[in-house]
Amino acid sequence: MNYTNCGNFKCSYEKDAALFQTLFSRLCIGVFLVMLVALPFLMDHYFIYILNMILIAVIGAVGLNILTGFTGLISLGQGAFMAVGAFGAGYLSSQVGLPFFLAIPAAGVIAALVGAFFGIPSLRLKGLYLSIATLAAQFIIEFIIIRAEPITGGVQGLSIDYARFFGIPINDDFRFYWLALPLAVTMTLLATNIVRSKIGRAFLSVRDNYIAAEAMGINLFHYKLTAFAISSFYAGVAGSLWAYYTTIVTVENFTIMVSIQYLSMIIIGGLGSILGSIFGATFLIVLPEALQFISNMAAGQFPAVSQIVGALKEMAFGLVIILFLLFEPEGLARRWRLIKAYWKLWPFSY
Amino acid sequence: MLAAPFLDVKNIYLSFGGIMAIAGVSFHVNRGEIFSIIGPNGAGKTSILNTISGIYPPDKGSILYDGEEITRLPVHKRPVKGVVRTFQNLELFKGMTVLDNLMLSRHIYMNYGLLSSVLWIGKARKEEVAHRKRVEEVIDFLQLTHIRKKHVFELSYGLQKRVELARAMCLEPKLLLLDEPMAGMNSEETEDMARYVIDLNEEMGITIILIEHDMKVVMDLSSRVVAIDFGEKICEGVPKEVAVNPKVLSAYLGEEKWL
Ligand SMILES: Nc1ncnc2c1ncn2[C@@H]1O[C@H](COP(=O)(O)OP(=O)(O)OP(=O)(O)O)[C@@H](O)[C@H]1O
Ligand SMILES: [Mg+2]
């Protein structure tokens, strides 16, 4: 369904391809960006920390959505590809001495190459079988990282310096925000460009009907690997940001749990929607923090049951996700569209 | 010297496990004609199209297109050469709009790369607009203007069939393979579709291979017909000859669609 206002007639095909179709939507996005810039000035470092985690997650989730939501290739390896980026950036900055603005894209490229390599089975495998193959990739990469001690530091991991921008170390939450925000915004915009280009259409066609796609001249090999490469590039950038944020890179931060978390983000946010990736990433970062907050409060009130409250928190996390899958199977992005449509017609919304 | 046929299918075989879908079929198609393949259900007609479009290359035999061997050419390279097909059971991109379905067919003609896609700079924009114009011509021709922004799954069966034809047209075919384009349509839609097929052939000079069960349509449109039964060719010729061929009649015995 398409909820642009009627009366919104375009007189050129160029305008029809524009990202933000109406003045109002351009205004909204402007206000949103201003808010993003203002937020860290109004918040304490804990909330900025959450924002930073969201920004990193957004990059990773947008990438995974390109692969899984747009191209229809399920991956359980996003965590491992983030690890490749994190260790790549770690190695390049600590051993080679690259500055962060070179190390981050380079780490992205390394992750993209690794991702494309592990995407090769996607040419033969689909659905569940492919997800098992990417699961194997997850474990193989973890294994290699632990074994490649001279490069990765093995189980100990790498310890790296904070990124430096004109001599200023990016060493607290507030400063890091100004690294993560522009990167996340840029990467999101680039993703919207990709999905509206011929590449995005090719991805969608592979997802919707790969036999027909091939018959219409789409090279499946090429586009499946491209999807893996782009997705892993995003994972690599997210991972390298994480590395610069924590300055300690260990493989434990990128286990299969992380992969599952990212998959949950895009499913909850909405498969095949860039906006949905943002919703989903925000939701899955905020939810555990909110539950933690609630359980802390509860534990303060009833210290005797604090043990149980901790366990309840985990259950609540699972429960909320299950409820979401039950009641919002098409993700938050769809709910958002419905809300927009509702207000557009308000008060005659029936 | 006699001109080589546009498409030359030479003694092809195709089997699925124990089932012989095609058992040694040969025929040729001349440039500019509408060539029909008929036969009862399960005769192997779609299988023949599948070998020509490369989805299932034949086990044996060869296929020459415009003098060039294409028997084992990868599927996605065939539209580039001008060999384009539609599907018997709608195979559209259901989650995409009609416009995007058609724009996808312009993919093989678009030259901009990853970088211009990512940055959405001049080249990507210019090409997108240029191809959008081509697509709009097809939309006009097939009268799809009112549904171009609709998602395919929202459309009626008849319209989806038309979108499939439009998608094939956007690829600018030289040899168009139509697998039962009128199946499941009412008589008005069938007539429209027949009109479009004739226009494609006569005005745009597209050579067409048509699979169709509606014998009236086959008789009216085709210049030549081949009849298939149990994966074998039972007869070939102009429509009038084929229609009265005793083998064809007995193959169709008991089928309602005949007559
Ligand atoms: N992918 C496949 N796998 C297994 N068997 C197949 C496959 N495709 C076709 N067949 C078999 O090959 C034979 C010919 O099928 P085909 O689809 O070519 O017939 P058709 O002439 O197009 O029939 P219809 O008029 O019903 O479309 C049938 O027995 C069918 O079951
Ligand atoms: Mg068939």
Image (spheres, coloured by chain):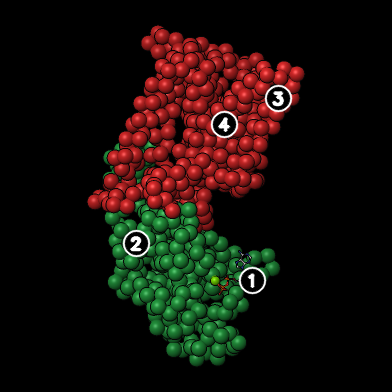
Are labels 2 and 4 on one chain?
Answer: no
SS assignment at label 1: strand
Q: Which of the pair B91/B19 is nearer the observer? A: B91
What element does badge 2 sit on?
helix
Of pointers 3 and 4, the one earlier in the residue sequence: 4
The three-letter code of the residue at mark 1 reads: Met
List x then y, in percent, for residue B173: 37, 63
Q: Which colour denotes chain A?
A: red
Q: Is residue A163 visible?
A: no
Quarter of the figure with the N terminus of chain B: bottom left
Q: Can you tell which chain is drawn green?
A: B
Label 3 sits on residue: A309
Query: What residue is shown with label 4?
Result: A284
Q: Is residue B258 left or right of residue A314?
A: left
The kind of secondary structure element at disc 3 is helix
Q: Is mark 1 within 8 Å of ligand 1?
A: yes
Would you say the residues marked 3 and 4 are in contact, meaning their CB atoms lie under 8 Å apart?
no
Give amino acid for label 2.
His
Which residue bears the numbered disc 2?
Answer: B146
As drawn, the label of residue B20 is: 1
Please say if A313 is above or below A250.
below
Residue at mark 3 to residue at mark 1: CA–CA distance = 66 Å
Closer to viewer: mark 2 or mark 3: 3
Relative image position of residue B98 (x, y in whole percent): 40, 57
